[in-house]
Amino acid sequence: MNLFKSPRRLHVNGVAIWAPRLPGWDSARAILSGSAAAPATPATRPSPELLPPNERRRAPDTVSLALEVALAACRNADLAPASLSCVFSSTHGDLAITDYMCTTLASAPAQLSPTRFHNSVHNAAAGYWTIGANCARPYTAITAGAHSFGAGFLEASAQALSSGENILFVSYDIDARGPLATMAQSSGLLSAAVIVGPQRGPRTVADLDMTLHAADGLVASRARAGNAALVAGNASESCLPFMEAIALGGARDILCLAGPNLGLTLSLRPI
Amino acid sequence: MAGVQPPRITAFTATCAAGSGRAELLRALRTDLSGLRTNDFGREPLATCIGRVSGVEGAALPAPFARFDCRNNRLAWLGIQRDGFLDAVHAARDRYGAERVALVLGTSTASVGATEEAYERLTPAGEFPEDLRRPEVHTPHSTAAFLQHILGLHSLAITVATACSSSAKAFAQGARLLELGIADAVIVGGVDSLCGSVLFGFNSLALISRDPCRPFDAARSGINIGEAAAFALLERSGSGPSLSGCGESSDAHHMSAPHPAGRGARQAMTAALNRAGAEPGEVGYINLHGTASVMNDEIEARAIAEMFPAATHASSTKGWTGHTLGAAGALEAVISLLSLESGFMPGNLNARELDAACGPQIRLASATGRLRYAMSNSFGFGGSNCVLLFAADPAA
């Protein structure tokens, strides 16, 4: 049974991705579609253009990654960052700051850094984005564990359908640090952004039909093995099949898990 | 929600320092009985007051769910069983099916307290102690995942983590799921529990008061941290008050300081009123964000003074509960719903002399009246604002 009652039509109006071996959408599109090899040397962390220069180096990895793809997706879509409501999704949030907070609390709690504390909130990346983009539109920051990409995509789509506007969706996770790495597993840096809207935009990438099903034993679509290896182990790696399908172009159906028993089928159709 | 009936709130409950369940909470509000106490949480308690829920430590989870055990999930389990809420959830699941009942849970720190404890008790090899080697609790989705499992839900279960607006935004998100037909019932709520991160974190920002917090008092000196679990069941029809408007906005100003002119707060209040088609004069009670921090209260008081008529009764209830962070939106939604039902409107407990920025809307003393609308404000770090507007059940 389709939980949407009927298929829902949206449009993919912009995309972006960043990982050390997928450094930006133009190169990622060539790599993911098999027409270019991944760079032998991983790229270093992006420097968020939207932050004041003195804050760029100090920005947490999550902020840096999320702002990079958010801005790139707006440029890809030719849409103004300040005009978009947004949904930020991350499985674990900033694992480096969680490690710092827990380490400091165990040794010298009174010395906790106020900046690191306010950066520890799950909505830090979203907050920095709205400040940098001077965006007064609402944002949300969500997690759904291993299903954060699918659940976040569903929320972004729900907002687009409800508001009739374009929604910026950003997904990111970073590598785990310290003792927490044995429990909250994630490696490497990865972020992806998709702008979905109920109307085609200036640079629509694909049309998108969605269905939502609850069932046991759902198996998510997979990216090609060589592509999956580029981001393997990152807690947000479930974004890759969708991004690969966009890179490949053509009509493709991607099953994305939005929960343990919840499948979001994203049917991409060329425009 | 244009053209769509606003969601009905068919069940709701809250557990916080001021009371476990609706009756205790309303009694505490009516009798000016604060739940705040001298901080007795953790190894080296800071000199402050806290809103601690009694009995969380003893509220073990049912054995099959022991892997989710932690303070936050115990508080969630304790809270969801009050006021027949669990029965209402089970009835909704039976009526609509497990794949039609969604869960949207707001939290700011989830169960990070369990991760903090693991770091305090690392083995000599630097690993987590054996009893805390449970990945389920060392991630921000911990509590929503726990509730999804224990309630047997197969629809969307999602965590909203936008700091102090988290569980207000859960109501807005839940309403969208109903509007789009993705679910037939949505459990929305918030759970946040005391932990070192927030006590020492707010301390590092010099926002913590040593004394019981005094929202909107001219001599207020900061916030007290509290904990709470609060839930509401949203359905497309049924009896009960309705969620007639939600307003969301971003300050786009600073990570931990509000916009000086309250731009985002005003936008969110205006959006909630517009969505409901309500005039400011129709709002009988506003439960303010009112953390008792110097800046928040001044900015919020100015916005209220300019936007609402003198007859509106507005107050912060954090003098009873402390600031329950990610749970505050849902807790104060419940207090607003109690006001709609009972006609009782709390004052500003602990405040003695109101700040000069306060207009006649902000009251020291409680009052009673007949309410059509009640509003609840939640403003969070990262400039995330969410305002909920509830309407009384016309049949009540």
Image (tube, rainbow, N blue to C red):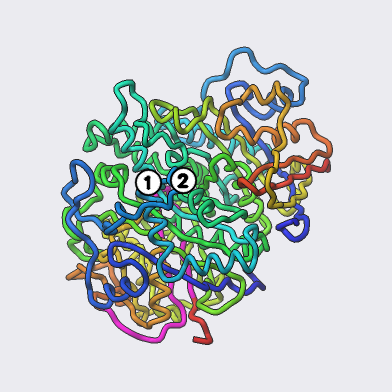
Q: Position of residue B355 (x, y in %)?
A: 23, 67
| Residue at 34% over, 55% down | B59
Cβ atoms under marks 2 and 1 closer than 8 Å = yes
Which residue, given by chain and number where applicable, does mark 2 sit on?
B142
Q: Position of residue A33 (x, y in %)?
A: 76, 26
How far, Cα to Cα, is label 2 from label 1?
9 Å
Q: Secondary structure at mark 2?
A: helix
Q: Viewer-proximal residue, B191 or B291?
A: B191
Q: Position of residue B184 (x, y in %)?
A: 63, 65
As drawn, B239 above or below B222 = below
Residues rendered magenta in the picture: B366-390
| Residue at 32% over, 62% down | B16
As drawn, B316 above or below A116 = below
Letter of the chain that mark 2 sits on in the rendering = B
> Residue B70, which numbered label?
1
With B289 as the anchor, is B38 left or right in this view? Answer: left
Q: Viewer-proximal residue, A228 or B376?
A: A228
Quarter of the rendering containing residue B304: bottom left
As drawn, B20 above or below A117 = below
- Type of residue at label 1? Cys
Q: Position of residue B384 (x, y in %)?
A: 45, 53
Look at discs 2 and 1 and give the one toward the viewer.
1
| Residue at 68% over, 52% down | A214
Please tell me whether the stretch drawn in magenta is mainly helix, strand or loop.
strand
Q: Is residue A18 magenta?
A: no
Q: Viewer-proximal residue, B245 or B79?
A: B79
| Residue at 43% over, 42% down | B137
Q: Is residue B40 visible?
A: yes
